[in-house]
Image (cartoon, grey):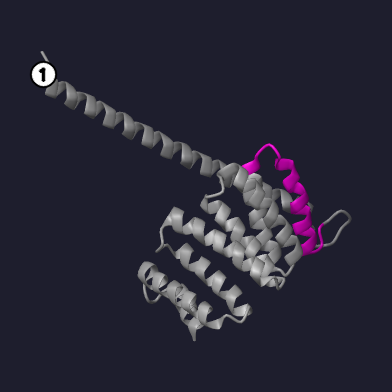
Amino acid sequence: RLTVAAIVILVLFSTGSTFQALRIARERTRANQETETTRQTLAFVDSLFERTDPMGKEGAVTSIKELLDHGRRKLEDLQDQPLLQARLKLRMASLYENRGFTHEAGSLAEEALQGLERSQGKNHPDTASALSALGNSKHNQGYNPEAEALHRRALAIREKALGPDHPDVAAGLNNIADSLANQGKVADAEALHRRALAIREKALGPDHPDVAASLNNIA
């Protein structure tokens, strides 16, 4: 006959094994989902270039702006995949921004933010990324108080979700500092840049390029 202690040990062991099995299953599911998301993303990118023709033939995309606009229209085909759609909108917002199309970038970033809040929740790191993208667009358009507010919301999410010493937190601090500097709040901006530097030195090491960037921000 099993003693009470033996029964307890067996129950604990079986419970632990069950939890471990569930954890492994969740990790496998997450990995499969990420793989599928990657596959769908690559398929979407491939679809953008179906109309691209360097010779400029009829119906071809002949400029980066046209390619981006074509991709933006294609995103509407993903209504049944809201998370993938929102993530791609966020990525395309960055592409627009990097090429100087700030109004289009801001519009897409707002759409991505709304989609990610619905799909991931208001306190998810993906949502913080959308807030940062929208903040960058506002910053580049000269709306610095609005940019600061968006970056502060993103920072609060990242500090809670990732911890105060994560490199993404340092990036958020730099974003706020840039908005403050453009408002003439130079001392406040420098203080945040120094916080970002300390985080990066601790997390990435003194020789990392991001540490050099932070030193340049303070210089």
- From this view, report whether residue 24 is shown above or below residue 85: above
Q: Position of residue 213 (x, y in %)?
A: 49, 77
Q: Which residue is mark 1?
A: 3
Which residue is at a point 56% across and 44% down the rendered structure image? 120
| Prevailing secondary structure of the magenta residues | helix
Q: Residue most toward the top?
A: 1
- Quarter of the image that includes the N terminus: top left
Q: Is residue 78 visible?
A: yes
In the image, taking residue 104 as reference, residue 158 lies left or right, namely left
In the image, taking residue 50 as reference, residue 212 lies left or right, namely left
Which residue is at a point 64% across and 52% down the rendered structure image? 113
In the image, taking residue 32 as reference, residue 20 lies left or right, namely left
Q: Residues within 10 Å of mark 1 (few under 14, many from 20)?
A: few
Residue 104 is inside the magenta segment: no
In the image, taking residue 82 as reference, residue 49 lies left or right, namely right
Nearest to the observer: residue 155 or residue 29: 155
- From this view, report whether residue 140 is shown above or below residue 124: below
Q: Position of residue 49 (x, y in %)?
A: 73, 53
Q: Position of residue 164 (x, y in %)?
A: 41, 62
- From this view, report whether residue 187 is shown above or below residue 60: below
Residue 63 is inside the magenta segment: yes
Q: Residue most toward the right?
A: 58
Which residue is at a point 61% across and 62% down the rendered structure image? 150
What segment carries the magenta color?
Answer: 61-83
Amino acid of disc 1: Thr
Nearest to the observer: residue 151 or residue 68: 151
Q: Secondary structure at mark 1?
A: loop
